Amino acid sequence: MIEKYLGISTDYIVIGLAALVVVLIILMIVNVVQMSKLKKRYGIFMEGKNAKSLEDTLIYRLDQMDELIENNATNERNIDTIFSKIKYDFQKFGLIKYDALDEMGGKLSFTLAMLNEKNDGFVLNSVHSSSGCYTYVKEIIDGNAIIPLAEEEQQALEEALKEN
């Protein structure tokens, strides 16, 4: 009867359906093999190292992240504290060596300028002579001396002001 309507022999229909069943069985076997491999990989993935579960590993890593975030915040606070204090440390220096007296050689006298970030600090002048060594300090505020500076002191101050 099917032969009448379709014009195809039932033998061909049966052979075609049998071929389709064989193809579907092959696909099913391939699918079962792939699922088996996937289950094995999933089992290994979930076990982790030394039979630790993935959940334990994730919790451990999240705890490490929390610790890192806390340490980072502490480091940022410490850096802010250091930067707020460093403004007042001496950061700029100028040193000039010279002969204070013609009779003395070797440039034993010196002038040292020390300034902080705001160009506040002092100029230290040490004059060496045959009768002794004398030291003087002059205050510097905002890059300017309150008391007039000698030539060597001015040179040391200018050298310190160059550093930025």
Image (cartoon, grey):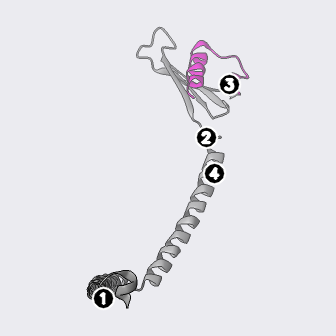
Q: Circle 3 is placed at which residue position?
A: 143
Q: Rate crowding at label 1 as few (under 14), some (14 to 19) or many (20 or more) other CA atoms within 10 Å.
A: few
Q: CA distance from mark 3 to mark 1?
A: 109 Å
Q: Rate crowding at label 4 as few (under 14), some (14 to 19) or many (20 or more) other CA atoms within 10 Å.
A: few
Going by the numbered disc 3, the residue's amino acid type is: Gly
Q: Earlier in the sequence, mark 4 or mark 2?
A: 4
Q: CA distance from mark 4 to mark 3?
A: 26 Å
Is 112 in the magenta? no
Going by the numbered disc 1, the residue's amino acid type is: Thr
Q: Circle 2 is placed at which residue position?
A: 89
Residue 21 image point, x, y percent: 30, 87
**Magenta-drawn segment:** 142-164
- In this rendering, the answer to whether 33 lies above or below 132 is below
Q: Rate crowding at label 3 as few (under 14), some (14 to 19) or many (20 or more) other CA atoms within 10 Å.
A: some
Q: CA distance from mark 1 to mark 4?
A: 89 Å
- 149 and 5: which one is in front? 5
Residue 6 image point, x, y percent: 38, 81
Q: Circle 1 is placed at which residue position?
A: 10
Q: Earlier in the sequence, mark 4 or mark 3?
A: 4
Q: Secondary structure at mark 3?
A: loop
Dot in front, 4 or 3: 4
